[in-house]
Image: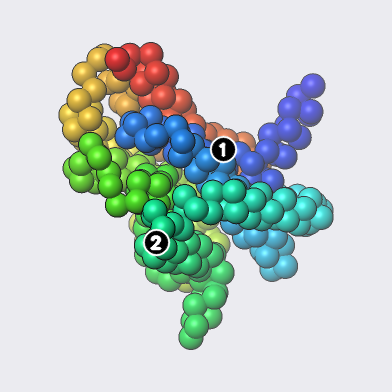
Amino acid sequence: MERTVNKGIAFLVYTNIFIAACAFALTAETFLLLKLPASANWYLPLLFCCTLFVYNLHYYVKTGTKKTGSRLAWCRSHKGLLLSLLWMSGLLIAGIVVTHFMELFFTGDSLNYGNISLFIFVPFAVLAYSHSIIPGSKKALRQQGWLKMILLSAAWSFTTTLLPVIMLMHGSTGSLSAAKLAVLFLHRFLFIAALSVLFNIKDQEEDKADGVKTIAVLLGPAKTLRYGQWFVFLTNLAASLLVLYVFGLHHPAFYAAVILPCGLLFLSYHRFRPAGEEAFFVVRYDGLMIIKALLLIFALLSFTV
């Protein structure tokens, strides 16, 4: 039974279904917080499929390198599956875009040049993070000094908070204030950045060999964890309280929903465990995204009038 469960967890993580579910959960939280129209909910499966495509492409390409690890060993022995998932997610993306073509690229009878630009720039930027596709550069953006953590956190925060508003509201945010959008983006950015540091600690040796300057490489794992646990807790707590204030969420359930993940972040740093199967590492730490989203989603559905 235990072996079957372990294989199931490895499958969900290494096929990147799990990380796509994390993106889905965070975006669902955004939809409820910002009260985006239900008619725009098709953005959720679109982001799920895009996340699935981008991450599977990353690891499919990485199987051709000399790097090692339990995840890459699994991916090398399941390259056909990764390729199938790439095709499947790519076709689903195309299907969703075609089905909602008018909503995406037109405002009334006029072309929506903003959305067209985003549809070109965002995929390029996301792919450039992992692949050396920028003309004149032999490195991906994640290999450019401090950009690894900053760009990853910004990409996740942008696509799960601001992008659905920009693309779906066609320049009219109605009751959505700039303050709400800014605070939600900051809250999401700090949370993702906190998780990114944990993964940077795990990847310290690889990053050091690649010349990537992360906090973990510069300070070392011990100092990063010791100082980071308080910095991460306090900054995320401040951002969480700001969310409660700006969105007018005063029920105790909302306080619990946003403060509990801050405590879990602190414990993740305080009792950090990098050893063991990579699949369980991903579930243990990236899984906090799903926990965070579900807590607030439950509170919003249960206590919002």
Q: Nearer the viewer, residue 137 or 305?
A: 305
Can you identify the residue that label 2 sits on?
110
On screen, residue 261 above or below 124? above
On screen, residue 30 above or below 254? below
On screen, residue 100 above or below 272? below
Q: Residue furthest bottom?
A: 136
Q: Quadrant of the N terminus?
A: top right
Determine the residue positioned at 54% across, 49% down.
100
Q: Name the quadrant containing residue 27.
A: top left
Relative image position of residue 172 (x, y in whole percent): 28, 47
Query: Regarding mark 1 in the picture, which secondary structure is present there?
Result: helix
Q: Nearer the viewer, residue 74 or 174?
A: 174
Can you identify the residue that label 1 sits on?
21
Q: Which mark is residue 35?
A: none
Q: Indicate left or right for 120 with 222 as reference.
A: right
On screen, residue 285 above or below 303? below
